[in-house]
């Protein structure tokens, strides 16, 4: 079985655009002062796509435990009925492994991005992604997802392949 090592890239708006949105202050489409000058609102940070087929937006928190590197990748998932956003609630980095929508991706189609503190991601509808990969510590993520009737998670398994994320 041939070993496939996945290299990590910096998470930038341009590099991540085929997969969704980078959520961070610098990517705000607009910002303005609110609360009598005591706060700035950074507005319209991601395209939330959850309303088709009777869907509705749901907000939740996911607590991810840190994963040691190197990490063998065994699964990818996608949400064909809506986007899915993850924003860490603590200042930390995490890894984002993605592949374009379509049939289950080949390991050569995977890309890995490393966030910096203050960044989150919004996966576009149908984008393949690995479950959360927290790095430094147990991390809470604010999640915007699709609720409503109908299955919204497909999984592809890679147990018989050697796909590794390294430091």
Image: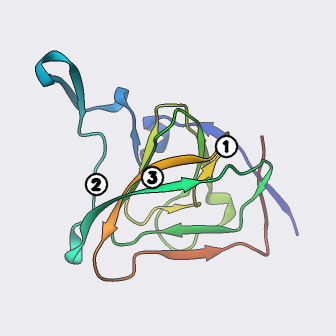
Query: Which of marks 2 and 1 precedes in the sequence?
Result: 2
Question: Pointer 3 and pointer 2: residues touching (CB < 8 Å)?
Answer: no
Q: How many tags in the picture? A: 3
Give the labeled residue for mark 2. Answer: 48
State which quadrant residue 23 falls in.
Answer: top left
Q: Residue furthest right?
A: 1
Query: Which of marks 3 and 1 precedes in the sequence?
Result: 3
For marks 1 and 3, give the CA distance. Answer: 21 Å
Mark 3 lies on a secondary structure that is loop
Give how far across and how far down residue 42 sits, in percent. 26, 30
Residue at 40%, 75% (x, y): give it. 152
Residue at 49%, 40% (x, y): give it. 15
Give the labeled residue for mark 3. Answer: 19
Residue at 39%, 72% (x, y): give it. 80
Query: Local crowd at mark 2 within 10 Å, few (<14), some, or many (≥20)?
Result: many
Give how far across and how far down residue 104 sits, in percent. 57, 73
Residue at 68%, 49% (x, y): give it. 66
Query: Which of marks 2 and 3 precedes in the sequence?
Result: 3
Can you say whether 50 is above or below 96 in the image? below
The answer, for residue 82, to whether it is visible in the render is: no
For marks 3 and 2, give the CA distance. Answer: 13 Å
Pick the residue in front: 166 or 42: 42
Give the labeled residue for mark 1. Answer: 135
Question: Pointer 1 and pointer 3: residues touching (CB < 8 Å)?
Answer: no
Q: Classify residue 99 as left or right of residue 75.
A: left
Q: On residue 127, which mark appears?
A: none
Query: Local crowd at mark 3 within 10 Å, few (<14), some, or many (≥20)?
Result: many
Q: Residue furthest bottom?
A: 150
């Amino acid at each position: 079985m041939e070993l496939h090592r996945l290299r990590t890239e910096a998470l930038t708006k341009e590099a991540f655009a085929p997969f969704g949105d980078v959520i961070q202050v610098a990517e705000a489409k607009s910002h303005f002062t609110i609360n009598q000058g005591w706060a700035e609102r950074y507005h319209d940070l991601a395209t939330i796509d959850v309303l088709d087929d009777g869907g509705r937006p749901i907000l939740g928190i996911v607590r991810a435990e840190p994963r040691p590197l190197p990490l063998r990748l065994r699964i990818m998932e996608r949400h064909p009925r809506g986007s899915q956003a993850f924003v860490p609630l603590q200042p930390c980095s995490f890894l984002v492994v993605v592949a374009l929508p379509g049939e289950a991706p080949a390991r050569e189609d995977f890309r890995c991005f490393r966030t910096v503190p203050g960044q989150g991601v919004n996966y576009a509808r149908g984008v393949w992604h690995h479950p959360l990969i927290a790095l430094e510590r147990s991390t809470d993520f604010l999640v915007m997802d699709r609720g409503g009737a109908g299955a919204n998670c497909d999984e592809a398994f890679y147990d018989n392949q050697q796909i590794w994320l390294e430091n």
